[in-house]
Amino acid sequence: MPRELSLADIFQIGYYWETKILLTAVKLDLFTPLKGEALTVHQVAEVLALNARVLDLVMNALVAMRVLRKEGKHFHNTPVAERYLVQSSSEYVGHLLLLHDAEWNNWGQLEETVRTGQSPVNQHVFETHPELGAKVLTVLDRIGRGSGPALAQRLQLQEAKQMLDIGGGAGTNAMAFCREYPGLSATVFDLPQTLTVTKQCVEDAGLSDRIRFQAGNFHEDAFQGTFDVALMSDILHYQDGKTNAALVAKVHGCLIAGGRLIIKDRFLDPSRTSPAWTTAFAVHILVNTEKGDCFTIEESRKWMEQAGFSAVEELEPCAMIQGTK
Ligand SMILES: C[S@@+](CC[C@H](N)C(=O)[O-])C[C@H]1O[C@@H](n2cnc3c(N)ncnc32)[C@H](O)[C@@H]1O
């Protein structure tokens, strides 16, 4: 049993001050001038053209939050800030935080959304801010590279020749699968603006001869080709269940007999109250997409079975499901 919440916990959750302080610091790129250096608030303010009096309050709070350190009048990055929040670091993750900062005003409309049932937006970030979306995908790609090989091995795709990666993003999974299975080629289907990143990542990985690209909108455009395996990874939550059911049926149409559809996502458990991260993510997606949602494994099983898939099985609890045509 999780421990009961205290009043202090309630305040900790309710007071979002630290969240906005961190997001603003990343937006202002406070950590980059501090790379390998200890600077006074006046020096940082001068480099970034900020107001030193106000910046001082923010930087002191960042020290209390253990993101910065302060010795005398000099501030410097903690190891975690130096590694992940300095723009020139190869492990920079700021773009993920900037995405949340960009969506701040949508969160401000949560109350209205709950009252009316109407989301404040009618498009998601990959449509409205493709440049930010692209940067986010680059970070996700770097993080996803760690888990890609194990996923590829787990799926046992030795027999597959052609893979379709729907909403494939930076091509992280397509690249991991092609590396694992030398006989496999892949098509990454995604929005044209996203594919500019995908092409670069695939080229950098030296896989341009094995991975093709199809630009389009997966709700409107047909998938070109016939495939042994299709992957839908982290794309369910941009649309409602009815639309996902139609997408799954469309994927069924482009698979060979015996072909497999694998859906990898953040699923809710049947009570819809767990995993905790996903319950909050469902609200995040509610205010940042027109009709997005999170779903249960059982809901996706139904979409697959209705489309004609058989042997539908949950490969990983709340994470992955597969069906065979
Ligand atoms: C969270 S990313 C997932 C990327 C990748 N599948 C992965 O697991 O790393 C969602 C992807 O879906 C793409 N996407 C969203 N809506 C789309 C649509 N209507 N048509 C095609 N691609 C779409 C986005 O451009 C983005 O690349």
Image: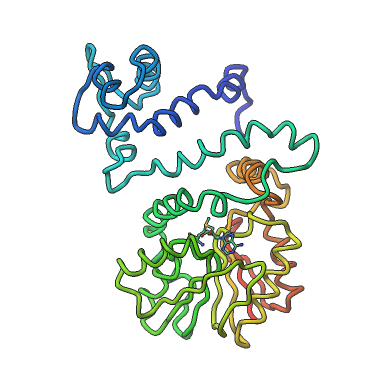
- Left/right placement of residue 64 relative to residue 192 reads left
Q: Residue 176: where, in percent of width, then height? A: 39, 69
165 over 59 or under it: above or below: below
**Residue drawn at point x = 49 percent, y = 73 percent:** 155
Q: Quadrant of residue 53?
A: top left
Placement of the C terminus among the 4 image quadrants: bottom right
Q: Nearer the viewer, residue 71 or 10?
A: 71
- Which residue is farthest right? 116
Q: Is residue 172 visible?
A: no
Q: Residue 264: where, in percent of width, then height? A: 56, 62
**Residue drawn at point x = 69 percent, y = 41 percent:** 120
Numbered disc total: 0
252 over 132 or under it: above or below: below
Q: Is residue 53 visible?
A: yes
Q: Residue 217: where, in percent of width, then height? A: 60, 66
- Which residue is farthest bottom? 257
- Left/right placement of residue 317 relative to residue 178 reads right
- Left/right placement of residue 248 relative to residue 70 reads right
**Residue drawn at point x = 49 percent, y = 82 percent:** 162
203 over 159 or under it: above or below: above
- Left/right placement of residue 149 relative to residue 78 reads right
- Which residue is farthest front? 49
**Residue drawn at point x = 42 percent, y = 72 percent:** 177
Q: Residue 276: where, in percent of width, then height? A: 61, 41
Q: Nearer the viewer, residue 6 or 303?
A: 303
Q: Quadrant of residue 32?
A: top left
